[in-house]
Image (spheres, helix red, strand yellow):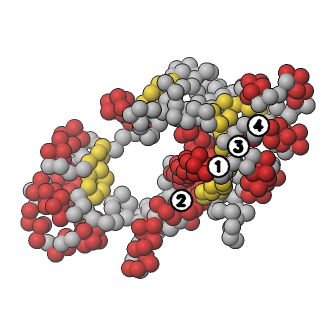
Amino acid sequence: MAGMLEGIRVLDVTRFVAGPAATVLLADLGADVIRIESPGGAEDRSTLPFKEGFHGGVGFTQLGRNKRGLSLDLSKEQGRAVFDRLLTTADIVVANLPRRTAASLGLDYERMAAIKPDIIFVHMTTFGNDGPYADRLGFDAIAQVMSGLTAISGEPGKPMKHNSAWVDMSTGFLAAFGAMAALHHRNRTGEGQKVETNLLQTAMTVGNYFLFDQYFNATNRTGTGNRAQSGGPADLIQTKDGWVYMVALGDPMFRRFMRMIGREDLLDDPRFANDDLRADNGAALSEIVTAWARQYSNAEILPILEANRIPAGPLLTPQEALDDPHVRDQFIVEVPVDGLSRPAPYIKPPVTFSKTPGIIRKGPPRPGEDAGNVLKEAGFTPEEITALRDQKII
């Protein structure tokens, strides 16, 4: 089955997480995504390496799937000349590099648009391309701690960022969204354009709820651990043999929860009269709920919560998440990857389509794996390709 983006070519000059997260979504939907990296392979290939000596790390394997590989030295004039010939065949260019670095490699929109007027250039940075921070370097964690969200996570006096690269991934998803919107515009008007996303703005978009709260209510929130700050009980609660997160938001759910645990006397407690007060007194609620929950195992308590229509889920380790029957049945697809001793447990593309589903066809490319075919398709002769190899341009 042909992917819905079949015929769309993407030149992928991205590294690490945010950029590859954008382009891999396009690749899953059938776009011809050509990962361009320096000869020998880029530095992001080895992050969190596999113990069995595979040619890439876990992040690269996850986000390099379905792509073709081209080694190309963009720091040299000959490399940029090769890129420009490829550019004439492309629809989208994606880069997540600081603006000065991108420009030094020929990856600035005005220059590319002069060669291919309808090109769409998706540029991803940490802080945006304007303003006093435009030339600063940064990663996911920098955006997390500057967004205001880390300060209200963790415990009071001990702020805590999240270990997952949620800002990177979210920025990549937004970049893919922007690329698709720009592609639709181009198909209607013939116009290309520049699309920009940045890490800090993504993080603050996610946290805009709390920014509104601070602006209008001056709440000066601090961390509340695993407890929600908008109602309760909502916490990771210890059971007889594990932990379960359970949530009651709004009066009807709170009433059901109190009846479930046999504490209807708390329905008239002024400390718990509404969501705001229940959040303010969340620690007390968590103690009450824990006293009830400790008499049950996870296997016993989850059906009780479900019967009372209380949203809940057990705390799972990464291995337990992999082994979960729903996850295995609905979300995981095992794909053979050349160089790994067993198929990789990819999570299926996160958006499903009833008629044109995304497919994970293969793992990531080796450095320069597809150089010959890519250049041949762009009109390079065998002699030109050999010369480029001899000059170490590819």
Frontmost residue, 346 versus 129: 129
**In this picture, residue 337 sits left or right of residue 88:** left
Label 4 vs label 1, nearer the camera: 1
Residue drawn where x is 13% and y is 57% of the image = 256
Q: Which mark is residue 371?
A: none
| Mark 3: amino acid | Val
Whole-angstrom CA distance, mark 1 to mark 3, is 24 Å
Whole-angstrom CA distance, mark 2 to mark 3, is 21 Å
Neighbour tally class for label 1: few under 14, some 14-19, many 20 plus, Cα within 10 Å: few
Q: Is 218 drawn above or below residue 259 in the view shown? A: below
Whole-angstrom CA distance, mark 3 to mark 4, is 13 Å
Residue highlighted by disc 3: 13
Frontmost residue, 187 versus 120: 187
Residue drawn where x is 12% and y is 53% of the image = 260
Chain-order first, disc 2 or disc 1: 1
Q: Are marks 4 and 1 in contact (CB under 8 Å)?
A: no
**In this picture, residue 392 sits left or right of residue 110:** right
Q: Position of residue 310 (x, y in %)?
A: 20, 51
Chain-order first, disc 4 or disc 1: 4
Q: Are marks 1 and 3 in contact (CB under 8 Å)?
A: no
Residue highlighted by disc 1: 190
The C terminus sits in image quarter:
top right
Residue highlighted by disc 4: 86
| Mark 1: amino acid | Gly
Q: Position of residue 193 (x, y in %)?
A: 66, 54
Residue drawn where x is 45% and y is 32% of the image = 356
Chain-order first, disc 3 or disc 4: 3
**In this picture, residue 169 sits left or right of residue 299:** right
